[in-house]
Amino acid sequence: MHAPSSPVGDGRHLRSIPPARLALIDRIVRARLPRHARVSQEFLRAYYRGVGEEDLAARTPASLAHAARCHLELGRRRAPGQSLVQIFNPDLRKDGFESAHTVVQIVTDDRPFLIDSISLAFARAGLAVHVIVHPVFDVRRDSRGTLSGIGAQGTR
């Protein structure tokens, strides 16, 4: 696999983002994260590129940055074919953000209809989905499954 020039490629994926959304994403990028948080600006931009302006504006930039960090941490180590699921009620002290809603984060191979299937299961259970963030990345992992590189989908 070709190594992208930066953690998420060359930025081509950002060209199609509407300016209003890009301005909101830039606020997320500028949010303060702990020094030990290894989250690049490019990752945050690619992570939120498909989220609507209304959903981004309804949350604080710091909350969105921390939510992306939690998702990245979940996927730092994964065996081929393994699906990782994290369901939690964010705690400000533990997670760096809080929410009135339960958060479901999934790291898995790209699967057709996954989001539709999960949304349908929630609806059948009478649960509302408040926001969906569905980033798809090309990733590289070492022999132990540890994340070694991230590229936005299509930047290989």
Image (cartoon, helix red, strand yellow):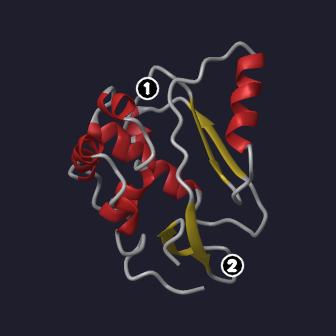
Q: Mark 1 Cα within 10 Å, few/some/many (few <14, many 20+)?
A: few
**Is any atom of residue 40 visible in this view?**
no
CA distance for labels 2 and 1 = 33 Å
Residue carrying label 2: 144
x, y percent for residue 133: 51, 41
Q: Is residue 26 left or right of residue 113?
A: left
Q: Can you tell which quarter of the image residue 1 is in?
A: bottom right
Give residue 99's mark. 1
Q: Residue at x 29, y 54 (%)?
A: 34
x, y percent for residue 99: 43, 26
Residue with the most extreme top position: 126
Q: Can you tell which quarter of the image residue 5 is in?
A: bottom left
Circle nearer the N terminus (2, 1): 1
Amino acid carrying label 1: it is Ser
Residue nearest the observer in this picture, 147 or 55: 55
Q: Secondary structure at mark 2?
A: loop
Q: How many marks?
A: 2
Q: Is residue 154 left or right of residue 142?
A: left
Vertical relation: 16 (above or below) 60:
below
Q: Residue at x 41, y 48 (%)?
A: 48
Residue nearest the observer in this picture, 31 or 138: 138
Amino acid carrying label 2: it is Arg
Q: Residue at x 53, y 69 (%)?
A: 154
x, y percent for residue 123: 71, 19
Q: Residue at x 53, y 35 (%)?
A: 132
